[in-house]
Amino acid sequence: MMALGAPLFPNELVEPILWHPVIFAYALVISGADLIILASLAYISRRMTKAIPLLLVLGVSFFSAALLGPLADLRQPSRAPLIFSLAHLVPTETHPGFSFIALYANLWLILIILSVIFLLFYQSYHLHLKSQAGGRLRILYRILSLGVGNEERYKKLKPFLTLLAAITIIPAVLWGIYPSVLVVFQTWLFLWRNWAILPLIFFADTFVASTAAAILVYYIIKLAHLDYDVLSPLLKVHSAGCVSVAGLLGVQLLLWNQWFDGSPLNTAFDVVVPIIYYVIALLLLSFILALASLKVTKLSVFVSIVALLGVILNKWNTLVNGQLISRTGLGVLSLELPPDWLLTTLSPIAAAIFIFIVLSSIFPLKVKEVG
Amino acid sequence: MRRRDLLKLGLSAVPILLLPTSHALTQPKRYAMMIDVTRCYGCMACVAACAAENNVPIGVFRTWVERHVRADGNIVFVPKQCNHCENPPCVKPCPTGATFKREDGLVLINDEICIGCGACIQACPYGARFVNPVKGVADKCTFCEHKLAKGLLPACVEACPTAARIFGDISDLDSEIKKLVESSNVQILKSWAHTDPEIYYKNLPKEADI
């Protein structure tokens, strides 16, 4: 193991990247929570309603795979259920404080239950219509329609669904800033401890990732028949996200410069700062492309690709490169990845895509508006 | 039971209640260590003794000795390990409560319920924790609690040829550690982290406070 610079703690040299790159894939899959937020907001405000089925199915698919990331990173994965059964949520004398990991694992369970109920009731009447149309899966559609067999009954669900959407937003927003709250508030790694606005960046960043994923999926599904009414609100949210993240990253660069200028600790930032400039450039390019796509919808695929590149680079830089800076702030470790890192990293994303394929074959992504 | 018997029993308890309570009965132990940096010459006997006593795998360390060069060019050796903090940042993020703080101040790990998430390792500002490559769980200094239970000293303290490490119950007013900590100008590591360590240093150079 080679270490660049010194001094370092000897235990840091054994495993410089304690949280493997799967943490970064996991941070991308979490964007499912933001898709659920967008779907809930759309339902409550009755705006961008055409996008709700896509946002909801994609959001549930991605979010349901969210815990696969940390599971892959556990050294004792068979003990993972202990996070629920022995959750450290209440401070005691022997166990002061509470664990963000335990809190968020339990919140995941709550959010997944709420969002699946929301999805099922939202799609109930549409599934009833699918069951009426016949086919091999008509019995499954009938079961999933939850007995909502006419428009009147479906309309009566509206207050319940509105309330459900409002409740769902709360855990989804909390998940939108995870794992940044964990790394900023419950770790002592040099970069993360000095990145106070990271939760804000993560919150905006997951909107960029989620809308980019939604735009890409929509583009692949529809190809030549892109609907401006679906695409336009996604592009607007995406543009706002891109500008916010780029701006917040710029603010953080200025803060670091002010805090550490002239200090020997300043050199530690050399690992992450150059990449932040690339991220800002990519996000601003995606913003410009998004504005252009409002006129030429075919360009939207480039909006998505450029943004995803920026998001991936940003997450890698924050979560993987961030761990390379020693706790001392005076040394940098060299990157050594486990041999199966790529497969492990891609598997939660692949699982999310697989779940989306299954769910999108059951739940329609384009529905007739009722009421 | 008759009323007279009850009264007798109550009266017999009065002298016990009036007895002066001894320190040992009322005050729980609070273990601490003081390290005099000027006495350490970097022989690594403590590191070897710790590894042997606790089966610490090769490449990871429950205690280590840092070599620092002072501004005046002199070399100092600074032993480091888990600080058994009064306000331990490693206990909070543990999702299952596997890491806990005992009444006697020891911060320990329950191997049986540690899931190996690494949260406690990332939370330690001192780099004192690591994943045990053999057991697959978090690991760190325990102050040799298995030896303390038998009334013995931690292996590193026993092994130090210059008595650079002083260990004891700091809640005991008559203990050597209590007297030394009170009479010396002691320092702690990373005081700005507000962890309140139970490892005190004497003559710690500022270069080593990292």
Image (cartoon, coloured by chain):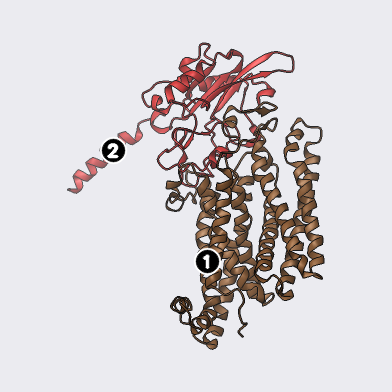
Chain colours: A brown, B red
- Where does the image place residue A329, in percent across and percent down from the top left? 69, 33
Q: Is residue B153 above or below residue B94?
A: above
Residue at 75 percent across and 65 percent down: it is: A300
Could you tell me how far apart the alpha carbons at marks 1 and 2 are, in whole angstroms?
74 Å
Residue at mark 1: A358
Q: Is residue B22 above or below residue A187?
A: above
- The amino acid marked with disc number 2 is Ala
Residue at 40 percent across and 28 percent down: it is: B24
A253, B197: nearer the viewer: A253
Element at label 2: helix
Front of the two marks 1 and 2: 1
Q: Is residue B155 above or below residue B28?
A: above
| Residue B69 shown left or right of residue B139 in the figure | right
The answer to whether residue A139 shows anywhere in this view is: yes
- The amino acid marked with disc number 1 is Val
- Where does the image place residue A285, in percent across and percent down from the top left? 80, 56
Mark 2: few, some, or many residues within 10 Å (few <14, many ≥20)? Answer: few
